[in-house]
Amino acid sequence: DAMVIQNPRYQVTQFGKPVTLSCSQTLNHNVMYWYQQKSSQAPKLLFHYYDKDFNNEADTPDNFQSRRPNTSFCFLDIRSPGLGDAAMYLCATSRVRGPPMTEAFFGQGTRLTVV
Amino acid sequence: DQQVKQNSPSLSVQEGRISILNCDYTNSMFDYFLWYKKYPAEGPTFLISISSIKDKNEDGRFTVFLNKSAKHLSLHIVPSQPGDSAVYFCAAIDSGGGADGLTFGKGTHLIIQP
């Protein structure tokens, strides 16, 4: 059974039209991450939540926001998608943050197309 | 500037032979390293990890070697099987640095040929 579920798998949005990607987990993990992966590039961390504490990466554009209403769900909001935001968006969870390290569990990703 | 580098975008290996995937890093503060495997249309799945206090970690057919002085790690798969065909990502973290996410390489596409 899938433990980290991302919806939708594929999302097409119009240039400048707000879009929300969702992630849910059944693992009861404390930490949830959002990564952006562009074609042939490394996944890049956008931000993460440790419980309700939001941690933004320094170079994440303001256009990207996140919400975590409860332990199970986390959302990625793109306020005004540009063509350069087309990418695979990966949600991941881990039980703890930092040492002792545990591996992150990833969802299947949402492929975002901006037209 | 890429802190984790996988310089081979793809690697082709015959079934039954050893696959060696390489990864280099530049941040000397990284102290924990992980390998992820990714099939098309699926998210990455954790494969194996190694702490900087070790130089080798083995799990079945998979062994990761870490050379801290060279800032290099490698993943060995032996024997290689068709199901090993996937993209392999190397990832690293500075567990004491306050940055809590993984830094990934661009991945190596491993193709196992029958």
Image: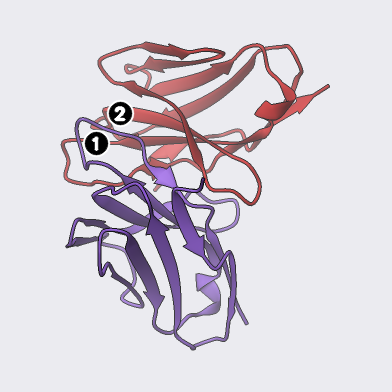
Chain colours: A purple, B red
- Front in this rendered view, residue B60 or B14: B60
Q: Give residue B50's quadrant in the image.
A: top left
Horizontal relation, residue A101 to residue A37: left or right: left
The vertical placement of A23 against B81, above or below, is below
Q: Secondary structure at mark 2?
A: strand
Say if labels 1 and 2 share a chain. Answer: yes
Residue type (three-letter) at the residue carrying disc 1: Asp
- Category of crowding for the residue at label 1, using alpha-carbon neighbours closer than 10 angstroms: few (below 14), some (14–19), many (at least 20): many
Q: Chain of mark 2?
A: B
Q: Rounded to the nearest whole Å, what is the CA distance between mark 1 and mark 2? A: 7 Å
The vertical placement of B65 against A65, above or below, is above
Which residue is found at the position 69% from the left and 28% from the top?
Answer: B83
Which residue is found at the position 64% from the left and 52% from the top?
Answer: B41
Horizontal relation, residue B1 to residue B32: left or right: right
The vertical placement of A43 against B73, above or below, is below
Residue type (three-letter) at the residue carrying disc 2: Tyr
- Front in this rendered view, residue B46 or A55: B46
Residue that numbered label 2 is attached to: B32
- Front in this rendered view, residue B20 or A79: A79
Residue that numbered label 1 is attached to: B94
Horizontal relation, residue B111 to residue B9: left or right: right
Q: Give residue A35's quadrant in the image.
A: bottom left
Give yes or no for contact between labels 1 and 2 (Cβ–Cβ under 8 Å). no
Which residue is found at the position 27% from the left and 42% from the top?
Answer: A95
Mark toward the start of the polypeptide (1 vs 2):
2
Which residue is found at the position 22% from the left and 42% from the top?
Answer: A97
* Residue A103 in sight here: yes
Q: Where residue A21 sits in the image (x, y, percent)?
A: 45, 71
Q: Chain of mark 1?
A: B
